[in-house]
Amino acid sequence: MSLLHQIKEKAAGQATSNELQQHARAVFLSNGIPTRKNEEWKYFSFKPTFDHDLTWVDGANQQLPINTQLHNIKANRLVFVNGQLDIQYSEILDQIPGLIVCSMEEASALHGAIFTQHFGKYASIENESLNALNTAFDPQGSFVYIPKGAVCEYPFFIQHVTTSIDYASFSQLRNLWIIGANASASFIESYESIGSNKCLTNVVSEIAIAENAQVNSYKLQQQQAVAQLNHYTQINQSAHSNVKQITVSMCGEIVRNNLHFKLNGPAADCMLHGLYFTDKKRLVDNHTRVDHVSPHCTSDEKYKGILTDESTAVFNGKIQVHLDAQKTAAYQRNQNILLSDKATINTKPQLEIFADDVKCTHGATIGRLDEKSLFYLRSRGIPEAVAKSMLLKAYAKDITDAIDEPSLTLFIEQFIEANI
Amino acid sequence: MLSIENLHAGIEGKNILNGINLNIRPGEVHAIMGPNGAGKSTLSSVLAGKNEYTVSQGSVYFDGKDLLEMSPEDRAREGLFLAFQYPVEIPGVSNTNFLKTAVNEQRKYRGLPPMEATDFLKFMREKMDFVEMDKSLTSRSLNEGFSGGEKKRNEIFQMAMLAPKLAILDETDSGLDIDALRLVSNGVNKLRSKENAFVVITHYQRLLDYIVPDFVHVLYKGRIVKSGTAELAKELEQKGYDWIKAELETQNA
Ligand SMILES: Nc1ncnc2c1ncn2[C@@H]1O[C@H](COP(=O)(O)OP(=O)(O)OP(=O)(O)O)[C@@H](O)[C@H]1O
Ligand SMILES: [Mg+2]
C-alpha cells in the first residue's frame, strides 16, 4: 500500500479531538504532497516516495546498536530511535532548576501548559503541506525548555536514528526547544539511519528564543545513502538574541532543508552557515529564509558546497526585509566547488527589501579545485588524493572553524578526508 | 643525475621548448639565463610535472628513471624540488601542517615511519633558523599574505626541509632584498654537497657571485643556445643578449 494511502487510512482510523491536529489534517489532505509545479519544489519532489509502499514506523521494536562516535562529547544527550527516546543512551548532566529535557510525549503529559503555549506556534502549516502532515499526528522527538537566565554548561546532543532494516520505512520527528531570556545553550543534532531499505524522515523543529539569549546550534545530516530527509526548521528570535546555526549535510539520498529565521525583536543577530557534500546521484536542497521584521538586526548567511559525480545541490536563499526593519544588515554567500562535469548546482538568491535604510549583499560562486594549488602541494611530494582533501578542508575551514566544539570540527574534517 | 634529451614541449599547440639538451651530474650547479619568455619557467614546470604542458618529443631521465612517466608527487619524493618563480597562496592550509604532510609523505615513500610531533617541531625550528625565517610565518596559512621576499624564503625553507637531490630555483633571487639574497645563497651553499645538484634560473649575475655555478647556459626561444662557465654570466651582464641573438642569426643565415 502506498505511503500516502496509509497516511489517509491512519487519519481516518485515529480520530483526534486536538484542534491543531484536526486543522493540520485538513490542510494536508487538501494540499497533498508538493510537486515540482510548486516553485519551492522546482528541482525535485517527495511525491514518488509517498507513492512507494513505505511502512510508517514509530518507536523501535528491538534494541539497536547506536552509533556512539560523537558520544565522547560531554553533553545532555537524548537518543531517539524512530522518535522514541532510548533511555539507555540518554543522560542529562546540567542540573539547572526549571530545566526540562525530555521527549515530546512526556512534555505534553507533564508540562502541558508550556507545551501548548509553544507547540505548533512557530512553524507555519498553511503553505507547507509536509509541516501540516508532521503536525497532523502525535509528535515524537525532543523537548527542551531552558529557563530564564540559565547558562547551560553542556551542549544538548539530540541524536535521531531512523530504521529501515527489514522494510522501507517512513517516520516523523519533531523538536521543540524554548530558550528563556538571557539564557545560553548549545545544541548538536545528528540525523542518522540504520538499514539499507528506502526510508523517508519528515522532521519539523521549532526553536523559540527569548530576549538576549545566546544559542549555538549544529545540525549533522548523516543518514544512509538510501535515506531521504525533509527537515523544516523555524527559529524565532526576540530582541538582542544571538543565534549561530550551522547545517552540515554529509550523506543521504535526498536532503531537503527549509531553514526559516524570524528576527522579531530589534538587534537580534543570526548566523546561518552550511556545508553540503553530494556525490553519486544524491541531492541536497537548502531553502533558507530570513525574515527581518525588526530594525537593527543582522543576518550572516554562508553556504558552501562540494559536489561530485552526478549529484545535484540546490541553494535558494530568501531574505525579506520588512518595512520597519531599518538598519538591517543582511549578508548572503553561496559558494560551490564542482569536482565533476556532471554535477549540478542551482543557486538563487531572493531578496525582497521593503525598508530603505538597509545593507544587503549577496553573491554566488561556482568553481573548481584550484589546479595551481593542487600542483603546488603535489610538487612537494603530497599525493593527489591527500592534496585534494587538504584543499577541500581548507575551503570548508571558515565553516568548520565556526563550530565551537572541537570534536565536532574534527569529525567533519575526518569525514572530508575519508569521503572526498 | 638528470639527463634531458631533445625535449620539445608546448601548450595548446604552441611550441615553447624546442629541443633542450642538458646533463647534470651530482655535485654540480648549473645556471640558466635567458630573456623573458625564453621558456625557463616552462622547462622547470615540465620537469616538475605540471600537466598543462604537453611533451611532444624527447626524454628526461632522473637517476636512471623516466621522469616524464612519473606523477608530480613521485618526482618530488624521488628527490626533485622546484622553488617556484611565483609560489601560490593557499588560504586555510597552515604552513606547518603542509610541511608535516610533505615530510611524512616523503618518509612514507622511503619506507620510514612518520616523524614524532616533537621531533618534527625541532627539525622545523632548526631549518627555520637556517634560513632565518620568521617564526610567525609558519603558523600562518601557506604563503597567504606573505611578501614577495617572504614567499621566496619560504621556498628555500621548504627545500631545506625536504633535502632534495636536485633543486631547481626559478628566479628565487628576484624580489629579495640584499640581506635575503645573501641568506638564500648561503642556504644553497650550505646544502651543496657531492651528492646533490642545483639548477639556478636567474636574470642577474649578482646571485652567481654568491652561488658560483659550474656551468652557465643561455636559453633562447626554447633552446639552449650557448653554454659556458661562470665567465659567460659576467659577459651577459655587460653585453646583454643581443650579441647572442646576432650570432644565431648569422648561423641561421
Ligand atoms: N600556460 C601558458 N599558456 C600560454 N602561454 C604560455 C603558458 N606558459 C608559458 N607560456 C608562454 O611560453 C613562453 C615561455 O614562458 P616562460 O614562463 O617559460 O618564460 P621564462 O623564460 O620563464 O620568462 P621570464 O624570464 O619572464 O620568467 C612565453 O611566451 C609564455 O607566454
Ligand atoms: Mg620564468
Image: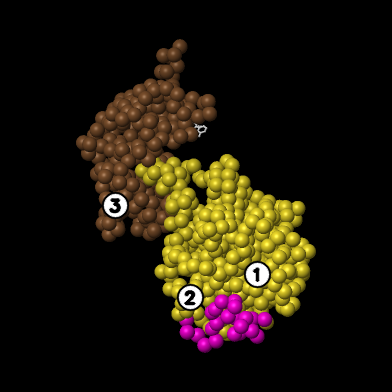
Q: Which mark is residue B114?
A: 3
Q: Quadrant of the N terminus of chain A?
A: bottom right
**Up-down: is B185 above or below B127?**
above
Near mark 1 (Cα within 10 A), the count class, few <14, some 14-19 or many ≥20, is: many
Give percent across and percent down for residue A278: 55, 51
Q: Say what secondary structure mark 3 lies in.
A: loop
Q: Name the residue nearer the viewer: A222 or B56.
A: A222
Give percent across and percent down for residue A226: 56, 54
Residue lying at the far bottom in this picture: please name it. Answer: A97
Residue lying at the far top in this picture: please name it. Answer: B253
Chain with yellow colouring: A
The residue depicted at 45 percent of the width and 11 percent of the height is B253
The residue depicted at 37 percent of the width and 55 percent of the height is B96
The residue depicted at 47 percent of the width and 66 percent of the height is A64
- Chain holding disc 3: B
- Find chain B in the image and tell me its colour: brown
- Segment colored magenta: A94-116
Q: Which mark is residue B57?
A: none
A114 within the magenta span? yes
Q: Pointer 2: what residue?
A: A87
Amino acid at circle 1 = Gln
- Chain holding disc 2: A
Mark nearest the camera among 2 and 1 is 2
Q: Pointer 1: what residue?
A: A234
Residue B195 in view of the camera: yes
Q: Name the residue nearer the viewer: A362 or B29.
A: A362
